[in-house]
Image (cartoon, rainbow, N blue to C red):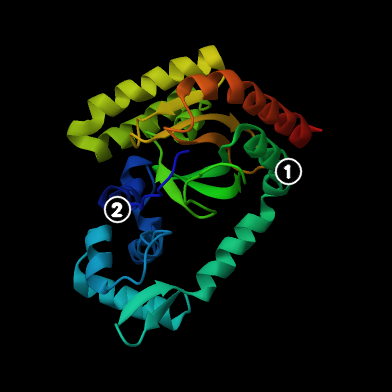
Amino acid sequence: MDAGGTGPGRGQARDARDAASAGGVDQRQFVTALARGLEVLACFRSRDGALGNQDIARRCALPKSTVSRLTYTLTRLGYLSVDESSGKYRLGSATLALGSSVLARMDMRQLARPWMQQLADATGTMVSLGVRDRLSMIYVENCRSSSALTLSLDVGSRIPLGSTAMGRAWLAALPEAERAQVLEDLAGQEGEHWPALHAGIERSLREARELGCACSFGDWQPDVNAIAVAVDAGRGMPRMAINCGGPAFQLSPAFLLEQARPRLLELAERLRQAVHD
């Protein structure tokens, strides 16, 4: 499935700092120090070990002296913990508490999980539920088939918005004006790679209209195939998406479209009905 989670990197760090001007936010109300502190927390990836100040500075495109002050402050507040032997940082327990509070409010996770597991078992795939964070999607629930090889992602993994089935399904569900703004942000991040990525997104948007799901067959990683649909989480929660897929050698596009797609669409419809009952 869309797997092998990636971190925000320099492009996403700039997204946060550019958000004030791009979104028409009053600069007098925008607290730059807070934004930079949040960037530091967001740069940690699910597969990371500890990160040093130099690693964080590179990922966030910030001066090392600034990062040193931010990591000191975040450590004092419990959002980072420091490895005394290496002087490097990991996410702290205060960050876990914040994430747990958000996940606890996502009733969709509890509702979707048994149906997601049924789909994973029936198709030999990995099935994941995700939400958008800037120019990425983050897994908030994940179910694996016990009978097949799956990819090593779990809750908290971050995947790209533009090249994955989950991200493309989320884009396909947006109103046109809102989608245009997100695509503009993606274009700014991707630079010279944007034309190829944009072509893949446009193809997926057509597929979403025609097939009911968005596809990514080797578009993100050459050995990963996946399909996905967007779902309305209800109760004021952000729009979500569910993907279904796995290693390309095991799950061909034909199998996903012919065997998995009807089950995925049925799952999405069940969820839509459940949250609006």
Q: Residue at x 45, y 15 (%)?
A: 206
CA gap, disc 1 to disc 2? 34 Å
Q: Nearer the viewer, residue 216 or 147?
A: 147
Q: Nearer the viewer, residue 127 or 233?
A: 127
- Indicate the quadrant containing the C terminus: top left, top right, bottom left or bottom right: top right
Q: Residue at x 60, y 49 (%)?
A: 141
Q: Nearer the viewer, mark 1 or mark 2?
A: 1
Q: Residue at x 43, y 44 (%)?
A: 3
Residue 67: image x %, image y %?
27, 71
Residue 237: image x %, image y %?
63, 44
Q: Earlier in the sequence, mark 1 or mark 2?
A: 2
Residue type at tag 1? Pro
Q: Quadrant of residue 22?
A: top left
User: Circle 2 is placed at which residue position?
Assistant: 9
Residue 80: image x %, image y %?
42, 75
Residue found at the very far bottom of the displayed protein: 84
Residue 247 is at least partly visible in this image: yes
User: Circle 1 is placed at which residue position?
Assistant: 114
